Image (cartoon, grey):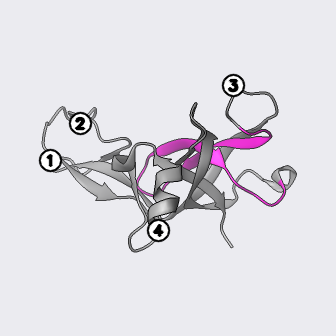
Amino acid sequence: MGEKASNQNEIYRPDLFSTTPSPHLIAGRCKSCGKYTFPKYYACPFCFSDELEDAPLSPTGILHSFTIVRRSMPDYPVPYGLGLVDFPEGVRVMAQLEADNLEELRLGQEMEVTVGRVRKSSDGKDIISYKFRPKS
């Protein structure tokens, strides 16, 4: 990203995702029981250990549920999809959905993590974060 472009965008919660080597979410994995949480918790909700480490989630998951938002708060462009995606590591994550045609989204569809604008800030900057889109 060039100097000018970086001044026009703001990253929301960069601790939750990475684009290297490709877009993926960063979860917490318990060193004691091996279970994953997203976002990473301070203690494992399964075994209560406080030994958690950052761990990448798979780049793809399955669309569990979704809705199409047609009226929203200011600064959120509508319509947009909002969905729950199940990842192989056993976590379910909610985020905006991107699709060429939101009406063609289907339950059980394979989705991939992507990064894009989720809204505008009060000063007009694009707020960038993780999203999901149908796997191509």
* Label whose residue precedes the other's in the sequence (3 or 4): 4
What residue is pinned by disc 3?
A: 73
What residue is pinned by disc 1?
A: 32
Q: CA distance from mark 4 to mark 1?
A: 42 Å
- Identify the secondary structure beneath mark 4: loop
**Tag shown at residue 2:** 4
- Identify the secondary structure beneath mark 2: loop
Is residue 39 at all visible to an observer of this figure? Answer: yes
User: What span is in magenta?
Assistant: 77-101
For residue 36, side relative to residue 81 (left or right): left
Q: Kindly identify the amino acid type of the residue bearing the numbered disc 4.
A: Gly
Is the residue under label 1 in contact with that under label 2 (CB below 8 Å)?
yes
**Foreground mark, 4 or 2?**
4
**Foreground mark, 3 or 4?**
4
Q: For the C terminus, give its image quadrant.
A: bottom right
Q: Is residue 35 above or below residue 68?
A: below
**Of 101 and 77, the residue lying toward us:** 77
**Tag shown at residue 44:** 2
Q: Kindly identify the amino acid type of the residue bearing the numbered disc 2.
A: Cys
Residue drawn at x 36%, y 41% as measured from the top left: 39
**Foreground mark, 4 or 1?**
4
Neighbour tally class for label 2: few under 14, some 14-19, many 20 plus, Cα within 10 Å:
many
